[in-house]
Amino acid sequence: MKYRTAQDLKILLLDEEEKFVNQIPREKVDVYSYLNENFDNTYLPDDTIYQFVFRHFFKLDNPSLTNEFEEKYFKLMEEQRDEERPNIVHITKNLYNIKNHKGNPTMQFPLAAAMLHAINPEFPSYDSDIAKAFDFSSTYHLSGFDKKMKRYIGQYQHTFNTYKELLDDEAIKPLIEHFNDKFPDHDQLPEVKKLEFIIGQLGNSMQ
């Protein structure tokens, strides 16, 4: 699969200089910061306010998902938080086995990535904006858990490696500095999350 590389994204980001940082909604950064700052100080299965904010931010409010899914999701996140290396395949498989309203298993890799990202922001999240930025191919036509998972894992590893390469590039540092200037009250966020906000905004502009 040919996805956009660090060099491809760098050209797109620097071509518009500060445009994508300027377009990031403050509410989005504020809400994420709330989740990031409060994660270590809450018991997820009982914290309905945290759950509400998380569902809104990571699009867990999917009509096809059941109340059972949401309950098990936050219990699983609580269980995974103490794991030294949470396993995204294990997380995705656990979520896959929870039937939707039609009684069918569903592939919820973006929500598995959101869980992993909440536990450790060094791991990327995965949503439609990120997928557009990288020009990721859909898994919709692939049949079965294993084929879909293989495609997603390849994309996820590509995202992780690309973020690392970009953060090591001196040319990207002015974008991160501009993020800090625009959101001085959130300059404590991990550098990788700042970069992800910027790349997500790039993807959003590709609608």
Image (cartoon, rainbow, N blue to C red):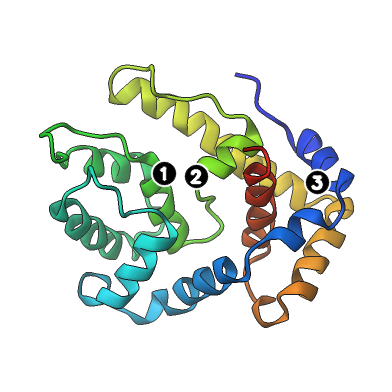
- The numbered disc on residue 183 is none
Q: Report the residue marked by disc 2.
A: 127
Residues marked 1 and 3 touching at CB (< 8 Å): no
Crowding near the residue tagged with mark 2, few <14, some 14–19, many ≥20 C-alpha atoms within 10 Å: some
Helix, strand or loop for disc 1: helix
Q: How many marks?
A: 3
Q: Is 150 on the left-hand or right-hand side of 171? A: left
- Amino acid on which the number 3 mark rests in the picture: Leu
29 on left or right of 100 = right
Q: Measuring 26% from the left and 38% from the top, which residue is drawn there?
A: 93
Reading the image, the residue beneath label 3 is 13
**Residue appearing at x 33%, y 54% in the figure:** 60
Q: Which amino acid does label 2 sit on?
A: Asp
Q: Do the residues labelled 3 and 2 touch (CB within 8 Å)?
A: no
Q: Can you give x and y, in whole percent of width and height, for residue 87 in the image? A: 37, 46
Query: What's the distance in space between the residues labelled 3 and 2, CA to CA?
Result: 19 Å
Q: Mark 1 points at which residue?
A: 110
Give how far apart the Cα atoms at labels 1 and 2 are. 6 Å
Image position, residue 95 (x, y; %): 24, 44
CA gap between label 1 and label 3 equals: 24 Å
Q: Is residue 137 above or below residue 90?
A: above
Question: Residue 183 or 177: which is nearer the viewer?
Answer: 183
The quadrant of the rendering that contains the N terminus is: top right
Q: Pick the quarter of the image with the C terminus.
A: top right
Q: Which badge, 1 or 2, is on the more N-terminal residue? A: 1
Q: Residues within 10 Å of mark 3 (few under 14, many from 20)?
A: many
Q: For the residue labelled by badge 3, is the local secondary structure a helix, a strand or a loop?
A: helix
Which image quadrant for residue 206? top right
**Element assignment for label 2:** loop
Residue at 56% across, 37% down: 131
Q: Mark 3 or mark 2: which comes first in sequence?
A: 3
Q: Which amino acid does label 1 sit on?
A: Pro
